[in-house]
Image (cartoon, grey):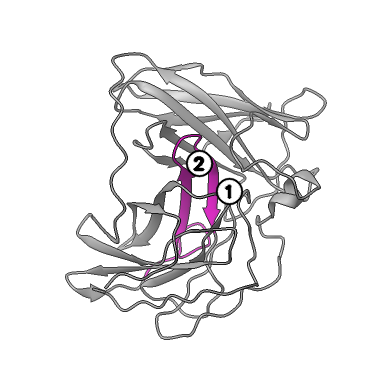
Amino acid sequence: MKTSVRLTAYAMGLVVVFGGAAGAGRLFGPDQAPKAPPAHTGTHTSTAAEHSGHAAQLPAGLQITQAGYTLSPLTTQLTAGRAQTFAFRILGPDGKPVTQYTAASGTELHLIVVRRDLTGYQHLHPVRAADGTWSAPLTVRDPGQYRVFADFTPRARTEGFVLGADVAAAGDYQPRPLPKPTWEARVDGYTVTRAGEPQSGAAAWMTVSVSRDGQPVTLEPYLGSFGHLVALRQGDLAYLHLHPQAGTTAGPDVTVDAEVPSTGAYRLYLEFKHGGKVHLAEFTATTGSGHTHN
């Protein structure tokens, strides 16, 4: 392994199973043994059962409406290669736009945009108008069908939601094959290495480590976390936020819970901050036995 990381699999103690909304992350220091994650603190983390009130729950992001809340895009078509404003509302059970949210990680709502072949990933932070309309500048590079995810917690509810909708960019759609599973990604001069793979139906941990010019870097907080990692399942684009483990010191390593609801391929999107800038590293991973890369 090119960077020194530790992978620890636990049989219990996960904070979040698949279907949780985005949550406040914490960095796991490189010289510490992994600890069981703490009990739920109410900081924008929730289980699938909390989302629906019962254990039987679709993975997050597959529904446009859940528990009376609806993602309502006002921008219904995108134009590839052109900057535009993407606008939408979250409608409540009364059919009116929701105007009160519980802020977490420094924002009331996360907007994820990705093409259905899992390319063109963007993590946006839209601005809410007084009437409940959200808007964000958005440029998609290529034509195709895009999935937009709104990740939020209404103030009227204790649990969070992740709702999804499709928005098309007209043109000649040329889907790209999913890249093969990798253990290392390079972005903006950084090398990001992962150890461990998502596991279906079993507790699992995955560690990612960031270095530059062969030297580990000390990651900087971004939206209250030292690393934000979203996984999307190939095929239906089911959404999972992989929540970092609790830790006490900053460093190059982030360890996340990695239990997923099914076997298959997942695209992993890690956002990390260093040198005052946010960088995005991408991996393909498959469910497996949790072997490590040598």
**Which secondary structure, mark 1?**
loop
- Residue plotted at (46% across, 85% down): 32
Answer above or below: position of 64 versus 287: above
Q: Residue at x 52, y 74 (%)?
A: 9
Q: Could you tell whether 12 is left or right of 260 in the image?
A: right
Residue 233 within the segment the image draws in magenta? yes
User: Is 201 rendered above or below residue 238?
Assistant: below
**Mark 1 burial class by Cα count in 10 Å: few <14, some 14-19, many 20+:** some
Residue position marked by numbered label 2 in the rendering: 125
Q: Residue at x 53, y 67 (%)?
A: 204
Q: Position of residue 155 (x, y in %)?
A: 76, 45
Whether 111 is drawn above or below 258: the answer is above
Quarter of the rendering occupied by the C terminus: bottom left
Percent across and percent down for residue 115 are 40, 31
- In the image, is 131 to the left or to the right of 119? right
Q: Earlier in the sequence, mark 1 or mark 2?
A: 1
Label at residue 107? 1
- Residue contact at pointers 1 and 2, CB within 8 angstroms: yes
**Does the magenta segment cover residue 53?**
no
Find residue 200 and report its image quarter.
Answer: bottom right
